[in-house]
Image (cartoon, helix red, strand yellow):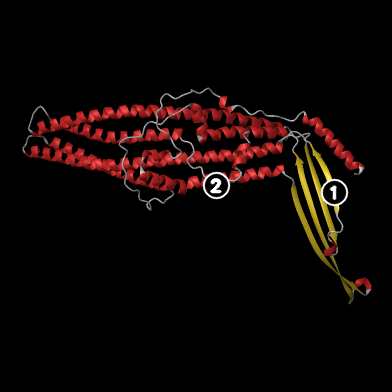
Amino acid sequence: MNKPLKWMLTTLLAMSLAFCGCRPKVRQSDVNSVIVTPKTFSMSGAGKTPDKWWTVLGDAELNKLIDTALQDNLDLIATWDRLAEARAAAVRADAGLYPSLTGTGAASRTRTETHKGPGGIGAPLGTTYASSFSLGLAAAYEADLWGRVRSTSDAGRLDVLVSREDLDAAAITLTAEVAETWYRLIESRRQLALLDSQIETSKQILELVELRFGLGKVPAIDLLQQKQQLESKRAEKVRTYSAVKVLEHQLAVLLGKAPGAFKAAGGVLPNKLPDLPETGLSADLIRRRPDVRSAHYRVAAANKRVAAAIADRFPRVSLSLQSSTSTTRVRDLFDNWFATLAANLTAPILDGGSRAAEVDRTKAVASRQLHAYAQKILKAIKEVEDALVRESRQREYIDSLGKQLVFAADVIAKTRQRYANGDKAVDYLRILAALESHQRLERTILQARRELIDFRIGLYRALAGNAARKANTAGEANEHEVEK
């Protein structure tokens, strides 16, 4: 080994040993202890919440709709694309851990003509040809003394985990939206049928008022009010029909279909919901929910980028090897080789505070992600508690509405009979009030039953785990190694 090269390698080794004691280290925050969470939830049941939570509702048509949505929804397909994008970016970041090798090749042929006469002008004396061939290899490798390249690679792998969890969260959101839209569509269709029934009832009342008006027993204002009441029901039917079409369009888009080209089949609202699911421990919820896991991985990736930013302030050591051969004949191409080995050291001296500012920026990002993770945990617990209390109180509300409907039915039956019999103590306004109350309660109960299903869907959504996970792809095991 020549003296200059020996001196260079010795100097680099000494500097490396000196800097090793200053290698930056970033401790992984224990993100699971950022906030104090309650151990259990306020209520719990004995039911189960499988990954395909919608199957417990026992609605075959809903199962078909959600299966279609998970396959064809364009937003979800775009989320799969983002996962593929993150995986490709992680592979690119991993490339810095390995040496790079570049090959070159060249071939040329030169023609030379010799001329007679002054200045080489005249007829050519002869033509000669010369050929040249060359091959070369160039290798480069950065010695990752401070962990910058490794931290960048780990951050890329964690980004893959973030994208994968975002995919599961998007799938769960999609399944809940399909289920909610489906049952709202069923309710709206039932509201249409109920309005048809109420319109018939209003027509019967109108016939009664017309009869009494013809006998001169009621004023014209009673007749006009009943006609207005009947027309208002017809107007409500028009608006409800519009809501049905809008919900059909919304459901079509969720399924990846064009509105108008998709027709939803008929369905019914469940008469009885499954048993209340077991809520378990809050720690189990944190581990199970993909949006919370995604926030956790974002914190870990941010910490890795802090480490990379700190390491970027230290010198970089790289090695390069170049080898080439050239000849005038192809058969002699590998006879003679020329090789060069070099070691390079680059260190920042003055950068106007750019690298220090990048460290501060990445630390701020890590802090922001940490607090966003804590907020996500609080939100997850809140969603479960909200769904529990809403479902519990909604059942009480529906029971109360049922009792009111019984009373209203008795009132309207007795009032209508007395009015038909000509009881002067019962005027038309009482009939109208009883009719409006009864019809309003019928529609409110139907809406309340659908809202109860919405609250249960919200609870399943808050407790659900993976809804879109497919078979593990190659390299997913390596992605998990980053956490260890």
- For this orientation, the residue located farthest to the right is 118
- For this orientation, the residue located farthest to the left is 215
Q: Residue at x 11, y 33 (%)?
A: 417
Locate residue 440, reporting x and y percent. Answer: 25, 34
Classed neighbour count for the residue bearing mark 1: other residues with Cα under 10 Å, few (<14), some (14–19), many (≥20): few
The residue to which callout 1 is attached is 340
Amino acid of disc 1: Thr
The residue to which callout 2 is attached is 81
The circle drawn on residue 39 is none
- For this orientation, the residue located farthest to the bottom is 123
**The quarter of the displayed image where residue 411 is located:** top left
Q: How far apart are marks 2 and 1 (CA)?
A: 44 Å
In the structure shown, which secondary structural element does the residue marked by tag 1 occupy?
strand
Q: Residue at x 62, y 30 (%)?
A: 364
Q: Earlier in the sequence, mark 2 or mark 1?
A: 2
Q: Residue at x 36, y 32 (%)?
A: 275
**Residue 482 showing in the rendered view:** yes
**Split into 4 quadrants, where in the image is the N terminus?**
top right
Label tally: 2
Say which of 39 and 382 sits in front.
39
Locate residue 473, reporting x and y percent. Answer: 57, 45
333 relative position to 310: left or right: right
